[in-house]
Amino acid sequence: MKVVRTVGELRALLAEERRARAGSARVGLVPTMGFFHEGHLSLMRQARAECDVVVVSLFVNPTQFAPSEDLDTYPRDEERDTRLADGEGVDYLFAPPTEEVYPPGFDTRVRVGGGLTTVLCGDPRRRGPDHFEGVATVVTKLFTMVGPDVAYFGQKDAQQSLVIRKLVRDLDLPVHIEVCPTVRESDGLAMSSRNAYLTVSDRERARALSQALGAAEQAVSDGERSADAVVSAARAVLDTAEVEPEYLELRSIPDLDLIDRLDEPALLAVAAQVGQARLIDNTILTPGGST
Ligand code: AMP
């Protein structure tokens, strides 16, 4: 595996890969902010299984962090990440310095419109739509830098995946988006780089997020269809663990409208601050059974 720092070098290497395969190389991209865990590695494995050339980007994107957020303290360990990506058979780890992505004078943004980016994590009372503007901008740039045939994202960040699908559709970007299942710890906690912030007692309480989603799944499989009742079942688990959700909402897919009744598959999404970690998780509830 080769570690690449500049767009110029990355383009030259990928052009060579394409030439070597008579222009038909299938290139897969896994965008990440590093500090790899099994969730990241599962995306790399999927890319490795499906593509000729696998590029993983490692870039802690400053434009998607609010000023109050953890940009400076976000966990980083490039040496370990390099080893792990190499172990998954990744071809190129693209780890540019910030100035390579945002050189002086950079002044263009990509904003996905509609309601998608102003609810849940995009609610102005929370991270706000600027968060998804930062995500859409960096992902558009990565797509332009790499020119991937397929890009891999995690269901863990369900709203982000929906935003990126809309971005690709609205701008006719020639890339196929694959969304891979959430990888969890054995007790159900969704893996996240931010789990590193959890103390032992926070870690106990953090389990409540996936348990709450599980309670909602159970309510649905018991026949419950009222959104209020399904959300209440999840809320009760959070209350018991004394976890105050930032949001816990049942919304339509793919538009993320609030719904009253579960007549079609819908997204139950939760976010909560647990100790120093802001955690998110979600499940798709389907009237015929959850996935
Ligand atoms: P991040 O480094 O947190 O920006 O995540 C990079 C990619 O990995 C995103 O597409 C995430 O959705 C995905 N990802 C993060 N955590 C998980 C997980 N537990 N399971 C599956 N995918 C994940």
Image: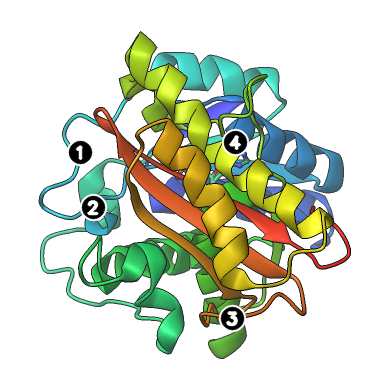
Point out residue 246 in the picture as x, y percentages from the top left corner: 32, 53
Point out residue 25 in the picture as x, y percentages from the top left corner: 79, 55
Residue 77, can we see it? no
The reply to whether callout 2 and callout 1 are in contact (CB within 8 Å) is yes
What is the spatial separation of the Cα atoms under label 2 and label 1, in whole angstroms?
Answer: 7 Å
User: Is tag 4's residue or tag 3's residue first in the polypeptide sequence?
Assistant: 4
User: Is tag 2's residue or tag 4's residue first in the polypeptide sequence?
Assistant: 2
Q: Secondary structure at mark 3?
A: loop
What is the spatial separation of the Cα atoms under label 4 and label 1, in whole angstroms?
Answer: 26 Å
User: Is tag 3's residue or tag 1's residue first in the polypeptide sequence?
Assistant: 1
Q: Which disc, if any, is residue 260?
A: 3
In the image, what residue occupies the spot 57% across and 82% down? 255
Residue lying furthest top in this view?
200
Q: What residue did someone put label 1 on?
A: 70
Does any atom of ligand 1 lie closer than 8 Å to the CB of label 3?
no
What is the spatial separation of the Cα atoms under label 3 and label 1, in whole angstroms?
Answer: 35 Å
Is the residue 242 above or below the residue 187 in the image? below
For the residue pair 12 and 165, the one nearer the viewer reads as 165
Does any atom of ligand 1 lie closer than 8 Å to the CB of label 1?
no
